[in-house]
Image (cartoon, grey):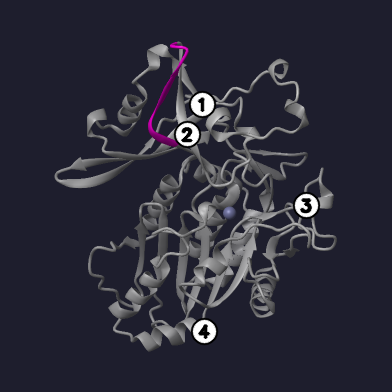
Amino acid sequence: MNPTLSQDLLTFLKHSPTCFHAVAEMASALTAHGFTELSETEKWNLTPGSRHFLTRNGSSLIAFAIPSSGIHSFRILASHSDSPTFKIKENPEIAVENKYVKLNVEGYGGMLCAPWFDRPLSVAGRVIVKENGAFTAKLVNLDRDLLMIPNLAIHMNREANNGYQYNHQRDMLPLYGDITAKDTFLKQVAEAAHVLPEDILGHDLFLYNRQPGTIWGASGEFLSSSRLDDLQCAFASLQGFLQGEKQESLAVHCVFDNEEVGSSTRQGAASTFLYDTLTRIHESLGLTPEDYRIHLAKSLMISADNAHAVHPNYPDKADPVNRPVLNGGIVLKYNANQRYCTDGISAAMFKDLCRQADVPVQVFTNRSDIPGGSTLGNISNTQVALNTIDIGLPQLAMHSPYETAGVKDTEYLVRAAKEFFH
Ligand code: ZN
């Protein structure tokens, strides 16, 4: 096992409080490894043997390496950059009793609400300013304990431990300051972004949990942090992509935004981002539309999005037979109704790959009476249809702002991804 990998993952998570930051982190790692950035607004002049990446909306990223011998097929590994959180609304400040200022927020994705209470929170995202006649996005992270959503005391809600339905508009608004904080929030954002408040023309700002990630357990076998779903997969995929030799197939590492809200956005898995990129690569290399379709028919995609491990307090929630555990290896996800793409053929290909990489695999299926979630694979296939397998790393507390996974599983995915791109 690589002793520094878990620390590297925690550093990546710390530097990635939002999807915009995660994409920027991956872009700088790719640049450091000799990948050059392309723009969707400019003409591409690609050559065999070259390595590039591009982003869309600053929140989705596709990196690819063209084999020196030309393209014969694709190997695509996909994950997602976004996580459930709360977004700061326009005109966010609300004065209470003329004594407090709280912020108006709305939910992004399907989060567990309870763990957002009684812990320091902060704000990160991007602001849009106009510089030299062009709109420019600036990443911003207030990076200090700034906000708190205080619980209501048990004395004022005696039913609190008997099940509680959280109302996003009433229950989830974070306290920002006393009344002297009125009209200062966007000034603080502007200061952190090194711009003037009046120059901010737009913003996409989100809450994040300040509690740093940690490695814990009797032998340090567990790892907890915000955003493990799905940045653990995005991180491990990128490591495997960078380490793999990428000699035979067009190697593609892609990370989509907006998986948590259904993927049907300009930069989500249901968008044309992947299709546009693959067809533009073909056009730039002088290949034909038929070449693209032949290559696609010979290709394989891995959709990597975290999976549910058996919960120690709720073992009855898992399928009676297929019971993934933390540190048990990569999880193959199956669903008869095709919320997951895995079928006999793609499972066989992936199991063979993991055997070659000496990586253990386990299986997830929902209990037949509990409908599960969906993910990237089947959605992406509506634009780019190819043999696809859905996998993930086992975790607990999915969609909490503090999730738990196994330290060994990150390395298993790095090894499998490296083998995939070999
Ligand atoms: Zn996910």
Residue at far left of view: 132
How far apart are labels 4 and 1 at the CA level?
51 Å
- Toward the viewer: 368 or 300? 368
- The residue segment tinted magenta is 88-98
Residue topped by disc 1? 174
Q: Is residue 131 above or below residue 351?
A: above
Residue topped by disc 4? 298
For marks 3 and 1 on the same chain, the one whose residue lies earlier in the sequence: 1
Image region (quadrant) for ligand 1: bottom right
- Toward the viewer: 38 or 190? 190
Look at 40% across and 57% down and name the residue there.
30
SS assignment at label 3: loop
For marks 2 and 1 on the same chain, the one whose residue lies earlier in the sequence: 2
Residue topped by disc 3? 310
Look at 67% across and 74% down and name the residue there.
347
Look at 56% across and 67% down and name the residue there.
377
Give the mark toward the camera: 4 or 1. Answer: 1
Tell me, for residue 105, which label it has, or none: 2
Asked if residue 93 is among those painted magenta in the image, a careful observer would answer: yes
Q: For the residue marked with disc 3, what is the amino acid?
A: Val
Q: Residues within 10 Å of mark 1 (few under 14, many from 20)?
A: many
Give the mark toward the camera: 4 or 2. Answer: 2
Residue 126 shows up from this direction: no
Residue 298 lies, in percent from the top left, at 52, 84
